[in-house]
Amino acid sequence: MPARTVAVASASGLHARPAKLFVQEAARLGVPVRIRVGDGKAVPANSMLGVLSLGAVHGTEVTLESDAPDAEEALDALAGLLSRDLDAEEALDA
Amino acid sequence: MRDDLLDPRGVLLHESAGSREEAIRRCGRALVDVGAVAEPYIEAMLERERSISTYVGEGVAIPHGTAASKEDVKRDAICVVRFPDGVDWDGDQVTVCVGIAAKNDGHVPLLAALAEILLDPDRARTLREATEVHQVTKELTS
C-alpha cells in the first residue's frame, strides 16, 4: 500500500491547531487516508479525535497510508503539511 | 498518565454560558483559579478560538491559548467545565469544555486519553453526563 513516513515538524506536535489544519486538509482532499504511529492502530486522517488519540508530539514519526486510486498525490500533500512547522507559520501570520 | 494535571477544583460540572466566548472565559477562569495560568491567558484562549475552532467532536471543545501565550502558563494543567444546557459552538453543540494550559508536551498523553474516551460512545456519554467530580477524574486519569 502506498505510504509515507514523516516526523511531525510542528513545535506543539500533532494536536491543537496543527491537528485541526491536518484534519481539515485530509477532509478537503476527500481521499481515504489513514495515519498511525509505528505499529499502532491506524486512524482516519480526517478524524480529529482519531488524530488526537495518536498523542504525536514534535518529532514523532507518523505513517500515512492509503490504497485509494489517487493516493500518491494526497499522501504527498498531507506528508508535506506534517513536515512543516505550522506553529511557526502562525507566528508569521500574526 | 500524569495525575497532577487535573486538579479536582478544576472540574466544574454545573455551569452555564450564553455564548462560546462566555464558556471560554469560564474555562480560563478555572485555570486561573487553580494557579495554572496568569490572567492574560484568558484573552489568548479567545484569540486562539477566533483563529480556529477547538471543537473536536462528541460535544467536546478543548479551548487553549496561542503559542505566544505560553509565557502566561505557570504549569501544565487542564480543567473540565460542563455546561448541561449546551453552548452553541459556531454551529456545533458543546456540553463539555476541556480547557488546556500547556508549556510544552506534558498534556499530550492526557489529550490522547481524552480522544480515546470520546471515540468510545459509552465513555463519551459518561463524560458528557457526569454529575460527580470523581467520575471525571476517574475517566481522565485512570
Image (spheres, rainbow, N blue to C red):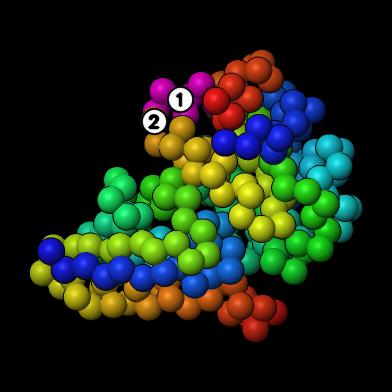
Q: What stretch of residues is rendered in magenta?
A: B121-127
- Three-letter code, disc 2: Asp
Left or right, A11 with reference to A74: right
* Residue at 23% across, 62% down: A65
Relative to residue B85, is residue A26 depicted above or below? Answer: below
Alpha carbon separation for disc pair 1 and 2 = 5 Å
Q: Main secondary structure of the magenta part?
A: helix
Residue B120: % across, % down: 39, 30
Residue B132: % across, % down: 66, 16
Place residue B111 in its image quadrant: top right
Left or right, A41 with reference to B133: left
Q: Is residue A24 visible?
A: no
Split into 4 quadrants, where in the image is the N terminus of chain A?
Answer: bottom left
Instruction: Say the numbered circle drawn on residue B77.
Output: none
Query: Closest to the observer: B51 or A39?
Result: A39
Residue sitting at the far bottom? A92
- Chain of the residue on which disc 2 is drawn: B
Left or right, B66 with reference to B92: right
Answer whether labels 1 and 2 touch (C-beta < 8 Å).
yes
Q: Is B123 one of the magenta-colored residues?
A: yes
Label 1 environment density (alpha carbons within 10 Å; few <14, some 14–19, many ≥20): some
* Residue at 69% across, 38% down: B5
- Three-letter code, disc 1: Arg
Query: Closest to the observer: A4 or B28?
Result: A4
Place residue B88 in its image quadrant: top right
Relative to residue A41, is residue B139 depicted above or below? Answer: above
Instruction: Say the numbered circle drawn on residue B123.
Output: 1
* Residue occupied by mark 2: B120
Q: Is B70 one of the magenta-colored residues?
A: no
Q: Is residue B8 visible?
A: yes
Relative to residue B1, is residue B123 depicted above or below? Answer: above
* Residue at 66% across, 32% down: B3
